[in-house]
Image (spheres, helix red, strand yellow):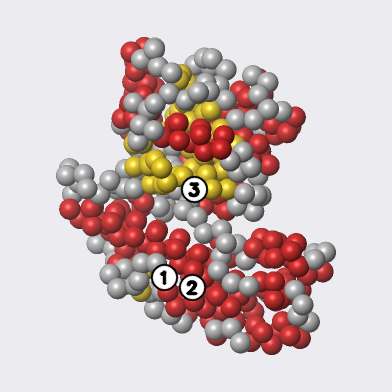
Amino acid sequence: MDILKRYIDQQKGEYFRRLDQPGNPASIFVIIPCYNEPEILITLNSLADCYPTDSNLSVIVVINDAEGAPEVAVSQNIRTINSISDWQSQHQDLFFDVQKIYAPSLPKKWAGVGWARKIGMDEAINQLVENKCSDGIIISLDADSLILPNYLQVVETAFHKSPQFGFFTIHFEHPFEDQKLNPAIREGIVRYELHMRYYRNAMAWSGYPHAIHTVGSSFALKASAYVKSGGMNRRKAGEDFYFLHKLVLLGKYGNINSTAVFPASRVSDRVPFGTGAALKKWMAGGSELNYTYSLEAFGHLKPLLASPYKFWDMTSAELSMGFEQLHPSLCTFCENSNTLAEIVELKKNCSNAEVFEKRFFHLFNAFWILKYLNFAHEKLLNRASLRTEPIL
């Protein structure tokens, strides 16, 4: 518990307030950020339809908005608070309790889904400390997502069966077969999900050992892993990408395929990128969802990522010669980003090849790869058609 307490003692909670007192002391928490969300009850009903967990569970909904947020969004947040309160009074016999946290007028610089998710996750840590729990499970969900009935039980069981794992990603599927969907949105979400699955598989094929999906509504982690990582970031978008790729470097993790999360397939302007933003551009006539990164670019990474241990025994001159043999786009990117010097420095700070190989992927992480892919396709390579590029 000391590690949890040390973390929470360093956090500031002046920007929000609890609207409910916690019920039975919980060791499992579902965190749901909620901004301008008229259908949160659909998600709560989906949770209510789940099979009960063995441990006490609490759902924390973080209703939030930023300084200067549109009045329509602020008003919807007030309606959301009232509708959840009504729902709570009608569902008093559930196996979990629901806690509302209200975070209005957050400073504009940081306000967004990342901060809202952090507020909820930090509150889960706070309650674990208050309840004298040494660890717990934090589940990340969104206010527009549905889940299978076995969802909570499967997540709880996964951590019990693999106590050495710090986190799990969870299988997701956008509900593109929903007959109510506009056909153009259906086409867009199919393309977007194809890109996501292709990208993850191409990362693994390139030799990167931590190829995972990073979807904010589809992961769960130990409280201890959360605090060891330094907690959730306050990014306005992409908070899940940065957070999960920080977690992969801390230890073992897994993926859950025996249940599923169903994120909404809808246009959104709440974040600058992600599903909603991609669909908004698609519906406005954008062509981005026609394309993805070429498989060729991932292939260029193979000599670098597939066997990093080979660099351990190389001299600086041999390293330089080896990098000159890389594809010109990758070689140029490495030169511009001073990568060769960073490898030399990394070798100096590692005691053996095993340590070097592990830390190698702290340098060549998912963010580094993404920056290379964008560089390569801006300078030398053409993006590939989603209709013709192989789905690995």
Residue 207 in which image quadrant: bottom right
The reply to whether residue 64 is in sight is: no
User: Residues under labels 3 and 2: Cα distance?
Assistant: 23 Å
Quadrant that contains the N terminus: top right
Q: Which residue is mark 2?
A: 298
Residue 276 percent across, percent down from the top left = 34, 49
User: Which three-letter amino acid code belongs to the residue tagged 1?
Assistant: Tyr
Q: Is the residue 192 above or below the residue 161 in the image? A: below
Give how far across and how far down residue 25 sits, in percent: 57, 17
Using the image, determine if residue 235 lies above or below residue 368.
above
Query: Marks 1 and 3: in contact by CB < 8 Å?
Result: no
> Is residue 390 visible in the rendered structure shown here?
yes
Given the image, on which type of amino acid does mark 2 rest? Phe
At horizontal 45% and vertical 48% (from top left) the residue drawn is: 215
The correct choice, above or below, for 334 with respect to 266 in the image is: below
Residue highlighted by disc 3: 255
The residue positioned 59% from the left and 72% from the top of the image is 306
Point out the tag, 3 or 2, that comes first from the N-terminus.
3
- The residue shown at (55%, 85%) is 328
**Badge 1: how crowded within 10 Å, few (<14), some, or many (20+)?**
many
Identify the residue at the far front of this view.
Answer: 161
Q: Secondary structure at mark 1?
A: loop
Under tag 2, what secondary structure? helix
Image quarter of the C terminus = bottom left
Residue 127: percent from left, percent from top: 61, 23
Answer with left or right where residue 211 lies relative to residue 126.
left
The numbered mark at residue 314 is: none
- Under mark 3, the amino acid is Asn
Which mark's residue is nearer the viewer, 3 or 2? 3
Answer whether labels 2 and 1 touch (C-beta < 8 Å): yes
Q: Which residue is disc 1 drawn over?
A: 293
* Location of residue 372 by image quarter: bottom right
